[in-house]
Amino acid sequence: MTYSILVKWARHKRRSTRKGSHSTSTIKILLRDLLVEVVAKVASHSLIDLQNIKRCCKGFLDASEDSYVWQRVSLDTFLLIQWLPNDEVSSFLKRCRKCGNIESLYREGLREYFDYPNGKIDGLEMLKVAAQKGHKEAKYVCGMILLCSKHKELRKQGLEYMRQLRNSKCVVSSRKKVKQLVGSVWKNNGMLKRNQSPLFNSKSTCKGWKVKTGIWILLDDDDDDNNNGDDISLCEYCRWDHELEFFYQVFNVH
């Protein structure tokens, strides 16, 4: 059910009510749980559309107050750092965090971990929670941070995050979204160090992952060949060593 259809339905409901039709007949068809799901879907795509759908009828307005909607509402129109916050924006973002909005949790994790000049390790835990809840950019940042570790077990966890993204063909798009969000907000705060031990540590030449025009280039996610989980080889390690170079550039890691 698209947003435009829902708007037409709400307008029809208002007209029917004015004509004396049973005011509760239509709303009974769409149970409250369904209304909440619909509003949450709209909210996850656009904050503007959420504001519009709330004006359609009381049913949508009431559903928009459900915590599930606040968990899903898009924060794309908000900067990562609110340089000139106002009470309305602060109250909105605070409620998102209180309701467990995954995007809000992801952003808070970024701010905590990369807080300049002294980042906080608690930020990584927030990022992990967001990643476990399915947030793709959180998975990307977590995966890369863990691959920067010198500990084998942590690097294995990082590989698992990155494999999940690769299986979904969203490594490159996730990287681009992270880069766009953080912009030029931070300089390296010392929380991360360049890992001097590559994942691909064989002395032999890797004959695996795709090379274009003599250099490593990823144009989009479709270019990131997916082996569907079959026989993970050293070629995969080359892939993530290369991705780490992108990550180092985004966060100015030396």
Image (cartoon, rainbow, N blue to C red):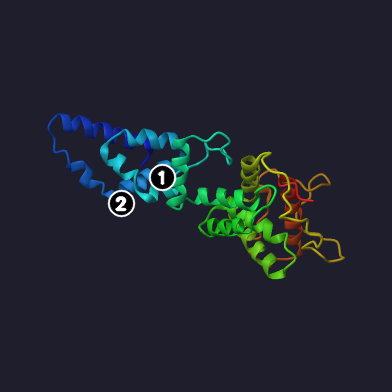
Which quadrant would residue 198 be assigned to in this image? bottom right
As measured in the structure, the alpha-carbon distance from the residue carrying label 2 to the one carrying label 1 is 12 Å
Residue pointed to by mark 2:
33
Q: Secondary structure under badge 1?
A: helix
Residue name at image x 66 percent, y 39 percent = 183
Q: Secondary structure at mark 2?
A: helix
Dot 1 crowding, Cα within 10 Å, few <14, some 14–19, many 20+? some
The image position of residue 30, as x and y in percent, is 26, 46
Spot occupied by residue 94 in the image (x, y as percentages of width and height): 46, 46
**Position of 155 compared to 41: left or right?**
right
Which residue is at 63% across, 40% downward?
Answer: 180
Describe residue 120's horizontal placement relative to residue 64 as left or right.
right
**Quadrant of the image containing the N terminus:** top left
Q: Nearer the viewer, residue 120 or 179?
A: 120
Residue extending furthest toward the left: 20
Where does label 1 land, which residue?
Answer: 41
Placement of 213 over or under 13, stated as above or below: below
- Please give the name of the residue rendered at 68% of the width and 54% of the height, measured from the top-left corner: 225
The label on residue 214 is: none
Question: Where is residue 229 shown, x and y percent of the image?
Answer: 63, 64
Up the image or down, 85 lies above or below 116; here it is above
User: Disc 1 marks which amino acid?
Assistant: Lys
The answer to which of 116 and 226 lies nearer the viewer is 116
